[in-house]
Image (cartoon, helix red, strand yellow):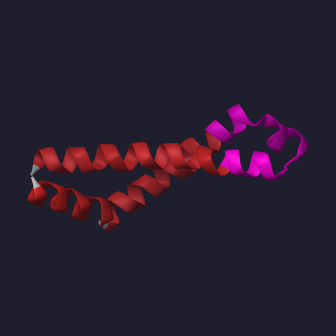
Amino acid sequence: MAESAASRWRFFCSRRVQIRALKTTALVGTILLAINHPEIVLEGYIDTSILLKSLLTYCVPYAVSSYSSVLALSERN
């Protein structure tokens, strides 16, 4: 089990997974931001609360993309 966790961590830290996750985050996160926080896009309004929510909006696609990439690579190997 420890070997499996160690290999998954190596996959997660790999350049390939990180680049794929960042590309997905940029695209999907921006779309989610426009949908969930139109006041930023349309009015340019931002405060601390909205800034925090916006940053968290980008965390979701990053986590999902990284997780799915690691699982796919783990199953392939």
Tell whether position 50 is magenta: yes
Q: Which x, y percent locates residue 13?
A: 31, 65
Residue 29 is situated, as x and y percent measured from the top left of the image, at 58, 44
In this rendering, would 11 be left or right of 24? left
* Relative vertical location of residue 11 with respect to residue 27 in this rendering, above or below: below
Say which residue appears at 30% left-offset and 59% top-offset: 12
Residue 10, percent from left and from top: 23, 65
Q: Residue at x 58, y 48 (%)?
A: 58
- Number of labels in the image equals 0
- Which SS type dominates the magenta stretch? helix
The residue segment tinted magenta is: 32-54
Q: Is residue 43 above or below residue 22?
A: above
Image coords of residue 57 (percent x, y): 61, 44
Quick check: 71 left or right of 32? left
Side of 41 where 17 appears, left or right: left
- The image shows residue 26, relative to residue 68, as above or below, that is below
Q: Residue furthest front?
A: 2
The residue at 17%/62% (across/down) is 6
Residue drawn at x 41%, y 61% is 19
Q: Does the magenta run of residues contain 41? A: yes
